[in-house]
Image: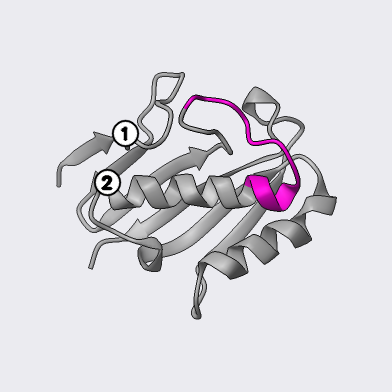
């Protein structure tokens, strides 16, 4: 099985030695997406606004591979403040229909660029 890295043109390119996503067989893994605009600025505002931007960026990465959010099997959220989890869950509920993907929240001390959170995803190509 071969692996192919990809980066959506609608999301800032990674600033490190990694791909925004990797496709391997039926699996599509999206690196944790920050709440960044295309220009690379962190979206100001509430945790819900940052979560929505992260999910928009996940969706852009998936669309670059011909997939949509309905292909997501798992989300991994890295959050700086546990108080933000309710707002993050509300954003997830806006973006996903039942059955929603599995979700893991990891509490972290920091997220790059001073963001409050970042979201990665595992999708399945059917």
Residue 42 position in % (x across, y down): 62, 31
Extreme right residue here?
A: 83
Ranked by sequence position, the earlier of labels 2 and 1 is 1
Asked if residue 49 is among those painted magenta in the image, a careful observer would answer yes
Name the residue beneath numbered marker 1. 9
> Looking at the rendering, which quadrant does residue 89 occupy?
bottom right
Badge 1, how many Cα within 10 Å: few under 14, some, many 20+? few
Residue 92 position in % (x across, y down): 60, 63
Extreme left residue here?
A: 1
Residue 123 position in % (x across, y down): 36, 58
In which quadrant will I find the C terminus?
bottom left
Task: Left or right? Give the position of 6 relative to 59.
Answer: left
Q: Which residues are magenta?
A: 39-50
The answer to whether 122 is drawn above or below residue 98 in the figure is: above
Asked if residue 69 is among those painted magenta in the image, a careful observer would answer no
Residue 65 position in % (x across, y down): 24, 49
Label pair 2/1, CB-CB below 8 angstroms: yes
Q: Residue at x 51, y 40 (%)?
A: 32
Helix, strand or loop for disc 1: loop
Q: Residue at x 52, y 73 (%)?
A: 100
Name the residue beneath numbered marker 2. 64
């Amino acid at each position: 099985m071969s692996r192919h890295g990809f980066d959506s043109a609608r999301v800032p390119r990674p600033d490190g030695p990694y791909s925004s996503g990797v496709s391997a067989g039926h699996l599509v893994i999206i690196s944790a997406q920050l709440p960044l605009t295309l220009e690379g600025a962190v979206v100001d505002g509430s945790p819900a606004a940052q979560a929505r931007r992260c999910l928009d960026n996940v969706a852009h990465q998936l669309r670059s591979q011909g997939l949509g959010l309905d292909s997501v099997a798992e989300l991994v959220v890295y959050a700086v403040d546990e108080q933000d989890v309710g707002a993050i869950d509300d954003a997830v509920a806006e973006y996903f229909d039942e059955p929603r993907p599995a979700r893991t929240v990891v509490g972290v001390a920091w997220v790059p660029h001073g963001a409050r959170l970042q979201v990665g995803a595992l999708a399945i190509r059917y």
